Image: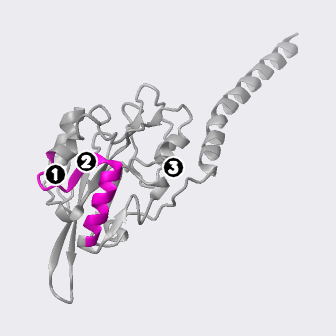
Amino acid sequence: MEHAVLVDPAKCIGCRACQVACKRWNNNPGEETTFSNEWTNPPKLSYNTYTHIKFKLEHNETTGETKWRFFNWRCMQCEIPACAKACPVNAITKYEEGPVVIDQDRCIGCKFCVSECPFEVPQFDTVSGKVSKCHMCFDRVPSKEPACVQSCPTDALVFGTRDSIIQKAKERKEELDGYIYGDVDNKPLGGSSFIYVLDAEPSVYGLPIVGESLSPTVPVLNLSKWLLVPAAIGGLAYLVAWRKKRMNEKEE
């Protein structure tokens, strides 16, 4: 049975408990950061940061009111993941429970998934030569909710079966007179296992407009790139052999 997470930014208080819980469960180290004019910390997703809280301060010049928006961000866990379609070694799998998981043992660090993800989620590590991202705590689901959800003190993250989450999203949308992103109103790449209910348009939160289906050229283009590598190696080997043969003939 497929599960999903309801993300309700209007309830988020920016405590970052989800960030800490995610790092603890995955044994990911903290990141050394510096002061900036933004409260967002760390500044973006990384190989060691799967869950990220974005801070956005809005000022209404007409009313003089100031408002904070806190936005929980990580992999959408798409129904038709572009990253999986782009991977030439089948290192990425969409599980029937919902998670999209990268097999670190199979990953070759080609970064095709990085370039094809419309949400810019997969992150490459120059040290390990691998790519990683949020995997929706596939090692906990469905018997236990994801670490980020378990740690949230305000129910800004709610875990359940996909059908129940969609129903809750519809009800919350009516309360907020808002929008649903990930299903119902907007189904990027066939929908997602992280479903947002928003009190403002998706663009306010920086969410991109993504089609419901995956472009059929994605795997074809990436396959052609992948085939260039052995083709180049084969061509070089041929030139070396040809030159060696010519040198032998000349010596004779």
Mark 3 or 2: the one toward you = 2
Look at the image and tell me in which quarter the N terminus lies. top left
For label 1, the crowd category at 10 Å Cα-Cα, with few meaning under 14, some 14 to 19 and many 20 or more, is: many
Instruction: Please say if the residues under marks 1 and 3 sit with CB atoms less than 8 Å apart.
Output: no
| CA distance separating discs 2 and 1 | 18 Å
Vertically, is 18 above or below 61? above
Q: What element does badge 3 sit on?
A: helix
The mark nearer the N terminus, 1 or 3, is: 1
Q: Which residue is mark 3?
A: 116
Identified by mark 3, the residue type is Glu
Q: Marks 1 and 3, Cα distance to the nearest angstrom?
A: 28 Å
Residue 89 placed where, x, y %?
A: 54, 31
Residue positioned 86% across, 16% down in the render: 250
Q: Is residue 243 highlighted in magenta?
A: no
Q: Residue at x 52, y 32 (%)?
A: 90
Callout 1 amino acid? Arg
- Image point (80%, 22%), residue name: 242
Q: Residue furthest top?
A: 252
Looking at the image, residue 51 lies above or below residue 234: below
What residue is rendered at 22% in x and 75% in y?
Answer: 58
- Examine the rendering and report whether any part of residue 55 can be seen: no
Q: Which residues make up the magenta segment? A: 151-174
| Residue type beneath disc 2 | Phe
Quarter of the rendering containing residue 28 = top left
Look at mark 2 in the image and give the residue it sits on.
159
- Check disc 1 and report the residue beneath it: 16
Disc 2 secondary structure class: strand
Q: What percent of the width, then of the height, locates residue 34?
A: 19, 52
Q: Is residue 61 left or right of residue 90?
A: left
Question: Which color mode does the image show?
Answer: one colour
**Was residue 159 drawn as part of the magenta stretch in this picture?**
yes
Residue 1 in sight here: yes
